[in-house]
Amino acid sequence: GAVVSQHPSRVICKSGTSVKIECRSLDFQATTMFWYRQFPKQSLMLMATSNEGSKATYEQGVEKDKFLINHASLTLSTLTVTSAHPEDSSFYICSAYLHGGNYGYTFGSGTRLTVV
Amino acid sequence: DAKTTQPPSMDCAEGRAANLPCNHSTISGNEYVYWYRQIHSQGPQYIIHGLKNNETNEMASLIITEDRKSSTLILPHATLRDTAVYYCIVRVEETSGSRLTFGEGTQLTVNP
């Protein structure tokens, strides 16, 4: 089946620094990738949608200058949390979508970000 | 977006069938029903999806009512590893690309 690899699985960073999270589709080319954020005991919240080679579309309330998304190839999307603050601590999850695929949406294993 | 309603929690005995309901009364004709589950601190895992016919795979069965306003996910023989949050999602069709919007889901606890 379709596999999405997400790295790192856990990261701790100091307040004010930037963190990059990678999302790779391993055995298929993803036309669209999605980034979600999940706070403890809450559901997944969609942050942005990215299509290869074009700018990401951000959900209302998500700061595009703070959460930089790059989708430079059909197998790689990155999320960079810039100038991280403790309130950015969360579980970040990517998803890749393949048009016409049996599964449609495949999720990465998530990244636990802790900002201290 | 077609909204879904699920019970916040359910319990099931190990080895018994788990039947998870979902209401999606505002679903439109070209929208699919997807089921995902999320085990604690992991990414969601695809289970099954369907449009109007009942579906079955190695993980579960999906029963969709004739009017498509509700569905039931059936895990035929629940195990302890099936303890997870189960999400019923109606797929949104948009020109910028389809996306999945998650509701609160149902916390299924399988008890020994």
Image (cartoon, grey):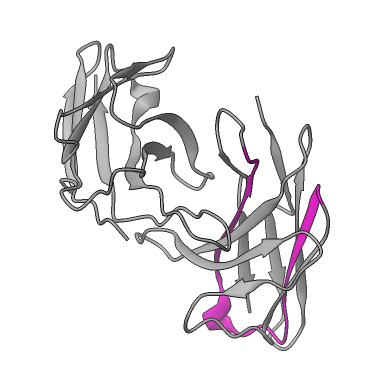
Is residue B21 visible in the rendered image? The answer is no
Relative depth, front residue between A78 and A104: A104
Relative depth, front residue between A90 and B69: B69
Task: Identify the image quadrant of residue B96.
Answer: bottom right
Is residue B14 visible in the rendered image? The answer is yes
Q: Residue B4 location in percent, x, y?
A: 23, 51
On the rendered structure, is B2 left or right of B67? right
The residue that appears at 69% across and 87% down in the rendered structure is A65
Query: In the rendered image of this protein, does residue B7 appear above or below residue A39?
Result: above
- In this picture, which residue range is highlighted in magenta? A74-99
Query: In the rendered image of this protein, does residue B111 appear above or below residue A69?
Result: above
On the rendered structure, is B60 left or right of A108? left
**Tally of numbered tags:** 0
A67 in magenta: no
Q: Quadrant of the C terminus of chain B?
A: top left
* Outermost right residue: A73
Q: Residue A102 location in percent, x, y?
A: 56, 28
Task: Identify the image quadrant of residue A5.
Answer: top right
Q: Residue B22 location in percent, x, y?
A: 19, 40
The residue that appears at 44% across and 39% down in the rendered structure is B39
Relative depth, front residue between B68 and A12: B68
Query: In the rendered image of this protein, does residue A27 appear above or below residue A80?
Result: above
The residue that appears at 25% across and 49% down in the rendered structure is B27
Q: Quadrant of the N terminus of chain B?
A: bottom left
Q: Residue A77 location in percent, x, y?
A: 76, 58
Task: Identify the image quadrant of residue B101.
Answer: bottom left
